[in-house]
C-alpha cells in the first residue's frame, strides 16, 4: 500500500458499521504509526522496508502505543477543529484500544497481500502465505470501494437518524 490513504477505506467501512463504537481518528493514527518505520528506511536507505512493525507482534505493540496516544491526540484534534468545544467528546479507552488494534492488524493484513518482504507471523513463521491472494489492483479497488460504500452508509445512517429526531420533536 502506498502509505495510509488506501488503508483508510476499510476503516471508513468499519466506522459506518460500528458508528460511535469506533474511532476513525485513532484508526488513522495507527495507520500513520505503522508506516513510520518504512518511511525511515526509505529516507535513510538502511534497514528492512517492512520490518518488525509489519508483523502481528510488532503491530500489537504499535496498537498499544497508538491507543495510548491516539485517544488524546484525537480529542485535541477535534477541539482544534471546533468539534469538541468544552471537551465533551471523550473517546473511551475500549474504543481507542479496539480502533488502534483494527488499524494495526488490518494494516499488516493488507500489506501482506502485496509486499513480498513482509513476514506477518514472525517469529513463528517467516513465510507470507497471504502474498498475492489478490492482485494489487484488486486490493486497491477493495480499499477504495470499501471507503466509498462506507461513506455512503455512514452518511445515510446519519441522515436517517436526523430525520427520526426531527419527527420525534414534531410529535
Image: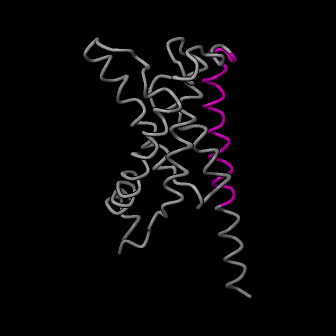
- In the rendered structure, the answer to whether residue 54 lies left or right of residue 47 reads right
What residue is at 40 percent from the left and 29 percent from the top?
A: 35
Please check the rendered image and state whether residue 99 is part of the magenta-colored stretch, yes or no.
no
Q: Main secondary structure of the magenta part?
A: helix
Q: Position of residue 129 (x, y in %)?
A: 66, 16
* Residue 71, percent from left and from top: 41, 56
- Vertical relation: 110 (above or below) 119: below
- Residue 153 coordinates in the image, percent (x, y): 69, 50
Residue 73 higher or lower than 50, as above or below: below
Identify which residue is drawn at 43% across, 39% down: 61
Q: Residue at x 70, y 85 (%)?
A: 170
Magenta stretch in the rendered image: 133-157
Q: Quadrant of the C terminus?
A: bottom right
Residue at position x 39%, y 37% in the image: 33
Q: Is residue 133 above or below residue 29?
A: above
* Residue situated furthest left in the rendering: 44
Q: How is the image coloured?
A: one colour
- Outermost residue toward the front? 124
Q: Report the label total.
A: 0
Where is residue 3? Give x, y as percent: 44, 27
| Direction from residue 145 to residue 171 in the image, left or right | right
114 vs 124, nearest the viewer? 124
Indicate whether residue 141 is drawn in magenta: yes
Amino acid at each position: 500500500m502506498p502509505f495510509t490513504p488506501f488503508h483508510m477505506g476499510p476503516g471508513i467501512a468499519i466506522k459506518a458499521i460500528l458508528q460511535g463504537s469506533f474511532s476513525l481518528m485513532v484508526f488513522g493514527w495507527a495507520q500513520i504509526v505503522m508506516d513510520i518505520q518504512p518511511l525511515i528506511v526509505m529516507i535513510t536507505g538502511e534497514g528492512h522496508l517492512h520490518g518488525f512493525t509489519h508483523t502481528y507482534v510488532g503491530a500489537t505493540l504499535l496498537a498499544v502505543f497508538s491507543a495510548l496516544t491516539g485517544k488524546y491526540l484525537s480529542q485535541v484534534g477535534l477541539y482544534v477543529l471546533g468539534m469538541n468545544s468544552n471537551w465533551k467528546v471523550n473517546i473511551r479507552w475500549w474504543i481507542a484500544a479496539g480502533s488502534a488494534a483494527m488499524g494495526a492488524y488490518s494494516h499488516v493484513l493488507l500489506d501482506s497481500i502485496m509486499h513480498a518482504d513482509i513476514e506477518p507471523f514472525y517469529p513463528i513463521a517467516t513465510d507470507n502465505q497471504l502474498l498475492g491472494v489478490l492482485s494489487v489492483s484488486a486490493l486497491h479497488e477493495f480499499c477504495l470501494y470499501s471507503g466509498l460504500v462506507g461513506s455512503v452508509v455512514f452518511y445515510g445512517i446519519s441522515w436517517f437518524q436526523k430525520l427520526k429526531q426531527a419527527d420525534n420533536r414534531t410529535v
